[in-house]
Image (cartoon, grey):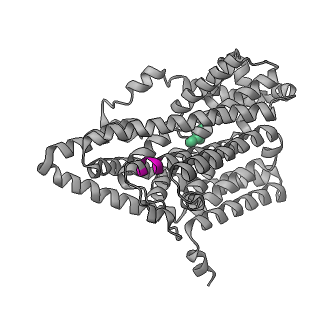
């Protein structure tokens, strides 16, 4: 009986129930058995279930992007439309990031999360080694020119094997265009990709049924290992970030995009993306959430496959509004803690670097924090100081990462809906429909 009513609940409700139960279980372990024992149980016995879920969705990222993108380009029917689509997508992504970064700087200036934190920060030595190792690993990532060049995969099989999203996008678009230009002879391949994309989407929906349990395990792990301490030591920083992300979601995506540009009901938009929000929040990875994001956009919001399959993977890689907000706030946090007065020019520099860095950040956990040093350097914070700041935030970053990832993903979907509408590829009836899968 209970099982039946559980299954009758829409998926997003089950995901959120999982999320809250996870928090309760984690806190129960942390405070019931003590941080040591409770944390150990959460890490050893609960986290593997969460990791299994994350791996299951990550498993689908490459096949899903490749098949939906190729079949999406084919459905578009005309290679010339791609240029316009690309320009609109990039333009909107830049616009939302622009709002995000200034919103973050505004809130960071108002709330002053770093004020009086100077002494606390010097106590961060515990995590410095861990941070240093990760920063070193990140240094091999190369500069902006290398990153641009890397979009062209010299070996597409390697790109697929490495899960190199931009390389896969590039190659898949070209294959789609090739199939279109070949005409009749390309038809079997077109049918293959169409069928493959349907099958991979079906598997995604199957995996999504496990989301409530995966999300529960991930939340129980975070809370079980860290407890509520995660809130108190990061209090103001977390508050500033959550507030700015919340405003970005409500004002920019909701008010500006959904209400004003799309003229569609706000509540339906949020119902439609609820699964993706739950998964993004608990996994802290836009890449791992991608299959869910695509599925929500297509099935709940009526975004055509051709748009969902192209705009969303691109967004998961380059559009990170939550990360941009965060980078701005961390820069202010550091400046306030170290007593640096920022000039207007420095604000603009922070905004610019935060935008560029958010574009370069990978959609994986902690990516934003490890890149914070780049933004800190433009306000004169040296590498050693930056490491201390990053080390201070590092142990609690998960809580911040979850919120910025949820924001990143919401931004991707809002832009996908807009591009779809402009391209005449948004089924508004599906968007407005009451029931959500
Ligand atoms: N975890 C974020 C994401 O996947 C990136 C970041 O660390 O800011 O979207």
The quadrant of the rendered image in which ligand 1 is seen is: top right
In the figure, 152 relative to 308: above or below? Answer: above
Residue 120 horizontal side relative to residue 131, left or right: right
Q: Quadrant of residue 99?
A: top right
Compared to residue 148, the image places residue 293 above or below, namely below
Please tell me how many numbered marks the rendered image carries: 0
**Taking 206 as reference, is 41 above or below it?**
above
Is residue 418 found inside the magenta-colored segment of the image?
yes
Residue at x 38% of width, y 38% of height? 86
Q: Is residue 65 magenta?
A: no
Image coords of residue 430 (percent x, y): 45, 65
For this orientation, the residue located farthest to the bottom is 1
Which of the 4 image quadrants contains residue 231?
A: top right
Give the left or right position of residue 43, taking residue 268 as reference: right
Residue 289 picture location, percent across and down: 52, 50
Q: Tell me, yes or no, if residue 340 can be seen here.
A: yes
Q: Residue at x 38, y 24 (%)?
A: 149
Specify the farthest residue to the left. Answer: 185
> From the viewer's perspective, is 173 left or right of 100?
left
* Nearer-the-camera pick, 132 or 340: 340
- The answer to whether residue 366 shows anywhere in this view is no
Front-lying residue, 272 or 178: 272
Quadrant including the N terminus: bottom right
Q: Work out whether 215 lies above or below 9.
A: above
The percent coordinates of residue 121 (x first, y second) are 81, 27
Secondary structure character of the magenta stretch overall: helix
Give x and y (percent) for residue 276.
55, 55
> Which one is in front, 296 or 64?
296
Tell me which residue sits at (56%, 75%) in the image.
7
Residue at coordinates 75% horizontally, 33% vertically from top-left? 108
Magenta residues, start to end = 416-421
């Amino acid at each position: 009986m209970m099982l039946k009513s559980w299954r009758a609940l829409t998926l997003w409700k089950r995901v959120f129930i999982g999320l809250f139960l996870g928090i309760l279980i984690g806190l129960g372990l942390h405070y019931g058995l003590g941080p040591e024992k409770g944390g150990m149980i959460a890490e050893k016995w609960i986290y593997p279930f969460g990791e299994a879920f994350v791996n299951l969705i990550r498993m689908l990222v490459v096949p899903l992007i490749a098949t939906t993108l190729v079949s999406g380009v084919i459905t578009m029917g005309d290679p010339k439309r791609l240029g316009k689509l690309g320009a609109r997508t990039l333009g909107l992504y830049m616009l939302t990031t622009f709002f995000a970064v200034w919103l973050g700087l505004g809130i960071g200036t108002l709330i002053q999360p770093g004020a009086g934190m100077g002494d606390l920060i010097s106590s961060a030595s515990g995590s410095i080694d861990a941070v240093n190792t990760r920063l070193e690993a990140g240094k091999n990532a190369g500069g902006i020119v290398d990153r641009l060049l890397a979009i062209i995969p010299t070996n597409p099989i390697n790109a697929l094997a490495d899960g190199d999203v931009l390389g896969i996008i590039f190659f898949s678009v070209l294959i789609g265009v090739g199939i279109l230009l070949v005409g009749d002879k390309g038809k079997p391949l077109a049918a293959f990709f169409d069928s493959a994309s349907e099958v991979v989407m079906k598997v995604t929906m199957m995996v999504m049924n496990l989301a409530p349990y995966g999300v529960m395990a991930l939340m129980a792990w975070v809370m079980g290992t860290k407890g509520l301490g995660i809130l108190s030591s990061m209090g103001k920083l977390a508050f500033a970030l959550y507030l700015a992300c919340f405003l970005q979601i409500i004002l920019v995506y909701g008010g500006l995009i959904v209400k004003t540009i799309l003229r569609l009901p706000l509540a339906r938009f949020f119902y439609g993306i609820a699964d993706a929000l739950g998964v993004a929040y608990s996994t802290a990875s836009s890449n791992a959430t991608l299959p869910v994001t695509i599925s929500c956009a297509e099935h709940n919001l009526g975004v055509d496959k051709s748009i969902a399959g192209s705009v969303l993977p691109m967004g998961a890689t380059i559009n990170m509004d939550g990360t941009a907000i965060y980078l701005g706030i961390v820069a202010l946090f550091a400046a306030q803690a170290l007593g640096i007065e920022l000039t207007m020019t420095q604000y603009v520099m922070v905004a610019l670097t935060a935008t560029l860095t958010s574009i370069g950040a990978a959609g994986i956990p902690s990516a934003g924090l490890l890149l914070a040093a780049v933004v800190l350097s433009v306000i004169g914070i040296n590498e050693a100081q930056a490491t201390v700041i990053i080390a201070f935030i590092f142990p609690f970053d998960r809580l911040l990462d979850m919120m910025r990832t949820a924001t990143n993903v919401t931004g991707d979907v809002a832009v996908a809906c807009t591009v779809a509408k402009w391209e005449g590829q948004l089924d508004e009836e599906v968007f407005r429909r009451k029931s959500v899968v």
